[in-house]
Amino acid sequence: MAVDVARADAFLTEMQVDSMRAELRGALEAKDEVAVDIAVHHIEENGLTEKLSADVQEAKTFLEEIRAQQAEDERAKVEAERQAKLEERRQAEQARLAEEQSKREAEAKRLEEEERLAQSKADALAAEKLEASNAEKQRLADQRR
């Protein structure tokens, strides 16, 4: 009878091992991180780690790879966000510099226009004085005759 109990216990243990292995394999094939983690926990909880050591090691390697990839993805995301902020700042600075340049150019045009107007007024005044002077000379010349 003790032999039958031992055989039944061994049979149940093998069934449990097969069941746990199937659960773990299914999770690994599905590449389901949560399911793999749960399957490993069930194996450890049921004391089957030794019997399924190769499977457990494969699962732990899978989990490490997934977590490493997630960490790398997070680093890449943070870097992309950092680059986007830098680009946004660069564009804002370029826009600010373009606006300043535009203001400088507008001010230069305004000053040029003021200078041109002042020169026109000075030229008109000089022409008026010359005309007045010529008219005075002509009047004096006419009086002498």
Image: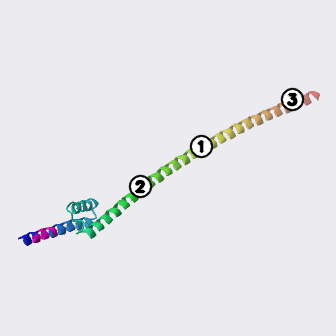
- Is tag 2's residue or tag 1's residue first in the polypeptide sequence? 2
Give the dominant element type of the magenta stretch: helix, strand or loop: helix
Residue marked by disc 1: 100
Which element type, helix, strand or loop, lies under badge 3?
Answer: helix
* Chain part drawn in magenta: 6-13
**Left or right, residue 133 beside residue 145:** left
Q: Is residue 67 above or below residue 112?
A: below
Disc 3 marks a residue whose amino acid type is: Glu
Q: Which residue is mark 3?
A: 136
> Which x, y percent locates residue 131?
82, 33
For marks 2 and 3, give the one nearer the viewer. 2
Which part of the image, by quadrant, shows the C terminus? Answer: top right
Q: Quadrant of residue 24?
A: bottom left
Q: Amino acid at mark 1?
A: Glu
By what rule are the colours in the image chosen? Answer: rainbow
The count of marks equals: 3
Name the residue nearer the viewer: 37 or 108. Answer: 37
Q: Nearer the viewer, mark 1 or mark 3?
A: 1
